[in-house]
Image: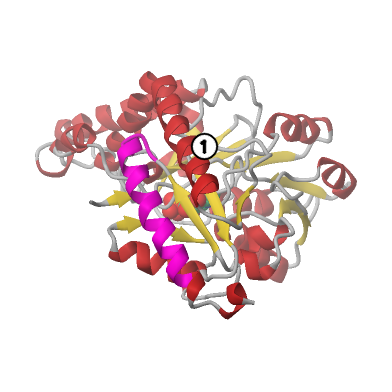
């Protein structure tokens, strides 16, 4: 049996979505910026994709910028605002649990003379709103706080943060990569100024993302070239990608309640079975407001990587809590920020469920996990102590 439980890393492109994309590779392949009628056909599809995305967020199409990824969208938001507003101030606020696309961009800006405050989180991974209020200075130009965390699933109070930002005339950006396609997002209700998203997280293609920019927000582009995307992001349009991403978002918005209920049922069943069958586990961020698809579990006294590799041999694909994507085996900055001791952070696995996972798959995973944990613990000097 193959069980894919790494949906926060990426998702399978839906076959219906792939079919809708295919003509834009080999039949309607004109450049939407071309003046000829063949290019115009691509432009119709490209504009329609922008319209679909804007409609799902309840905003205007002209406020959506296509990018090649959410990492790029995050860079454009943070660097773009920093450069455009640097005369007003040089201070940015973020949190300690952001994705590296945010943290490393903030670090790079610190090297350029900007000051960044990193707001801590509580044991459930929720940011400390009082610390955020206290961190605001007259030089603060931007708050960038993620909507939901990719490792533990904690959802941040972005309504309150956007209100606070507005009261203080500070721009608010949110990295919504883990919530677009998982939660309904109405930007009339939550007045964020900038929001990043990525197609491959919700059964659309990789290589396409986007940034919503509220009317009136200034951005200095960091990719210079042609005048595409309203002069904010140069580069030939990825029409097939935009079609795929918008259709995937539309598909989600039509089925969101059913998807939400199914994923929650499967994830909750999984966690109940883990607690019933495996001793000495911690379900991280369990008492916080969490995405219904994410389960971060520390299996005390054994290493997450060892669990991951043994599950892999049994056809089960998960992610460990450490930053292994960069070859770095240090413990996750997210878990450490939540106050989880390093040894438990190192023993953590992230299971991220998707709409196609089933209860039968969970039963198989629980059996494999029970045996894997028992074998590894029998070899662990810490467990034996
Ligand atoms: N932000 C968050 C919260 C993510 O989870 C990810 C991807 O895992 C990214 C940003 C980067 O997205 P992309 O792969 O589109 O660059």
Can residue 318 be seen here?
Answer: no
Kindly tell me whether mark 1's CB lies below 8 Å from ligand 1: no
Location of residue 289 by image quarter = top right
Q: Position of residue 30 (x, y in %)?
A: 18, 40
Q: Residue at x 53, y 56 (%)?
A: 222
- Classified by dominant secondary structure, the portion drawn in magenta counts as helix
Q: Residue at x 37, y 27 (%)?
A: 252
Location of residue 54 by image quarter = top left
Q: Position of residue 95 (x, y in %)?
A: 71, 52
Side of 308 where 240 appears, left or right: left
Q: Residue at x 28, y 34 (%)?
A: 243
Span shown in magenta: 354-376
Q: Which residue is mark 1?
A: 179
Side of 80 where 57 appears, left or right: left
Side of 147 where 116 appears, left or right: right
Q: Position of residue 307 (x, y in %)?
A: 44, 66
Q: Position of residue 250 (x, y in %)?
A: 35, 25
Q: Residue at x 60, y 38 (%)?
A: 290
Q: Nearer the viewer, residue 12 or 354?
A: 354
Q: Nearer the viewer, residue 91 or 329?
A: 329
Is residue 355 magenta-colored?
yes
Q: Residues within 10 Å of mark 1 (few under 14, many from 20)?
A: many
Above or below: residue 306 compared with residue 187 = below
Q: Quadrant of the C terminus?
A: bottom right
Q: Nearer the viewer, residue 269 or 277?
A: 277
Can residue 288 be seen here?
Answer: yes
Q: Secondary structure at mark 1?
A: loop
Above or below: residue 59 compared with residue 78 = above
Is residue 204 magenta-colored?
no
């Amino acid at each position: 049996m193959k069980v894919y439980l790494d949906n926060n890393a990426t998702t399978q492109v839906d076959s219906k979505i792939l079919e809708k994309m295919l003509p834009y590779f080999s039949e309607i392949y004109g450049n939407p910026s071309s003046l000829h009628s063949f290019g115009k056909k691509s432009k119709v599809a490209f504009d329609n994709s922008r319209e679909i995305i804007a409609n799902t967020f309840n905003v205007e199409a002209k406020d959506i910028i296509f990018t090649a990824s959410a990492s790029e969208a995050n860079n454009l938001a943070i660097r773009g605002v920093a450069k455009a507003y640097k005369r007003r101030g040089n201070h940015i606020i973020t949190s300690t649990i952001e994705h590296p696309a945010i943290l490393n961009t903030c670090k790079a800006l610190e090297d350029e003379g900007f000051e960044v405050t990193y707001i801590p989180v509580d044991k459930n991974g929720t940011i400390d709103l009082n610390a955020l209020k206290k961190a605001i200075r007259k030089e603060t130009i931007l708050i960038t706080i993620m909507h939901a965390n990719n490792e533990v699933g904690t959802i941040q109070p972005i309504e309150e943060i956007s209100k606070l930002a507005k009261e203080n005339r500070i721009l608010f950006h949110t990295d919504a990569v883990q919530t677009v396609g998982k939660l309904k997002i109405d930007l009339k209700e939550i007045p964020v100024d900038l929001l990043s998203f990525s197609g491959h997280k919700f059964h659309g293609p990789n290589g396409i993302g986007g940034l919503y920019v509220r009317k009136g927000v200034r951005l200095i582009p960091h990719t210079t070239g042609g005048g595409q995307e309203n002069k904010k992001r140069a580069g030939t349009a990825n029409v097939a990608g935009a079609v795929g991403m918008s259709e995937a978002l539309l598909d989600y918005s039509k089925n969101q309640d059913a998807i939400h209920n199914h994923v929650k049922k499967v994830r909750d069943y999984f966690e109940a079975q883990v607690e019933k069958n495996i001793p000495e586990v911690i379900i991280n961020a369990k008492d916080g407001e969490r995405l219904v698809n994410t389960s971060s579990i520390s299996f005390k006294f054994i290493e997450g990587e060892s669990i991951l590799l043994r599950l892999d041999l049994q056809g089960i694909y998960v992610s460990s809590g450490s930053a292994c994507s960069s070859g770095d085996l240090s413990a996750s900055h997210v878990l450490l920020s939540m106050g989880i001791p390093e040894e438990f952070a190192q023993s953590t696995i992230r299971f991220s469920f998707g709409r196609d996972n089933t209860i039968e798959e969970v039963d198989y995973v629980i059996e494999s996990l029970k045996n894997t944990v028992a074998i590894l613990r029998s070899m662990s000097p810490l467990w034996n102590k």
